[in-house]
Amino acid sequence: MKNLTKIAILLIIIGLLSIGTAFALSGGDLTRFSMAGTPENKQYQASASDVTELVVKASIADVTVTGADQSDIKIDYTEDRSINYNIKQEGSRLIMQSKGQFFFFNFWVLNPFGIFNSHKINITVPKELAAKVNVKSSTGSITVRDLNLKDNLKLDDSTGDIQLEKVKASKDINVSASTGKISLDQVSGQNFDLSASTGDIRTKQTQASGTTFKANSS
C-alpha cells in the first residue's frame, strides 16, 4: 500500500512538473498545448413527429433541453479529439451518445489550465413534445426548461446539478443526482421520484399526485 501511495505521489509530481514546463514554454498560455484540439461546432436535426423517445448519454458535458416554437428537434454540440458523439435513429428512438477515450484524471487536473475544452449540448425541441425524454450525464449539469411533455421525463446525473424550470409532464418525472443538487421551479407531473445522494432537493411551485424524496429537501 505504501509503495502504491509513493507511486501515485510521484506521478502527480511528474504531472505538475510537466504542466509547469508547458506553462513556461507557452508564455503562460497553456491552450497552445491543448490535448483536445480546436472544437468543431456541429448540428443535428430531426422531425419531432418521427421521434417517440429522445435519449442522450453524455460522458462530460452540460446538457440543456429547451422548448421552443418549432416542429423539429435540433441538437447543437461541439466535438474535438477528446469527445465526439454518435447520433442515430433506431426506429422512433433518437439516440445521442458520446464515444471515444477520455481520462477523468487528466480532465480534473488539467482542465482548469485550459488544456481541455468545455463541452455543451444544447437541444431545442417543440414546446409541446410527445416523446419521452431520457438524459444521462456522467459529469456536467442538466437543465430542462419551457417544456410540456406528453410522456415521461427521466434525468440522471452522476456529478453535476439538475435544474427544471417551467416543465409539465403528463406522466412521471424521475430525477437522480449522485453528486449535486436538484432544483424544480414551476414543475408539474403525475408523480415525482427525486433522488440526490449528496446534495439538496429544492422545489418551488411544483404539483404532482405523488412525490418521493431521497435527500435533504427544502
Image (cartoon, rainbow, N blue to C red):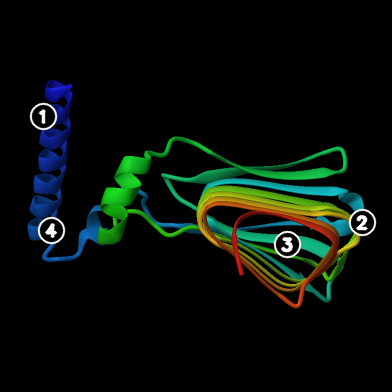
Using the numbered discs, state the Cα–Cα distance from disc 3 to disc 2 in whole angstroms. 13 Å
Using the numbered discs, state the Cα–Cα distance from disc 1 to disc 3 in whole angstroms. 49 Å
- The amino acid beneath tag 4 is Phe
Mark 4 in CB contact with mark 3 (< 8 angstroms): no
Q: Nearer the viewer, residue 55 or 159?
A: 159
Q: Nearer the viewer, residue 4 or 17?
A: 4
- The amino acid beneath tag 3 is Lys
- The amino acid beneath tag 1 is Lys
Discs 1/3, front: 1
Comes first in the chain, label 2 or label 1 = 1
Q: Viewed as shown, does residue 101 lie left or right of 193?
A: left
Q: Helix, strand or loop at disc 3?
A: strand
Q: Helix, strand or loop at disc 2?
A: helix
Q: Quadrant of the C terminus?
A: bottom right
Q: Which residue is mark 1?
A: 6
Comes first in the chain, label 1 or label 4 = 1
Using the numbered discs, state the Cα–Cα distance from disc 4 to disc 3 in whole angstroms. 39 Å
Comes first in the chain, label 4 or label 2 = 4
Q: Nearer the viewer, residue 100 or 173?
A: 173
Q: Residues within 10 Å of mark 3 (few under 14, many from 20)?
A: some
Q: In the rendered image of this protein, does residue 102 appear above or below residue 76?
A: above
Q: Which residue is mark 2?
A: 49
Residue 23 is labelled as: 4
Q: Viewed as shown, does residue 94 lie left or right of 28?
A: right
Mark 1 in CB contact with mark 3 (< 8 angstroms): no
Residue at 16%, 40% in the rendered image: 12
Q: Helix, strand or loop at disc 1?
A: helix
Q: Which residue is mark 3?
A: 74
Residue at 84%, 54% in the rendered image: 172
Q: Residues within 10 Å of mark 1 (few under 14, many from 20)?
A: few
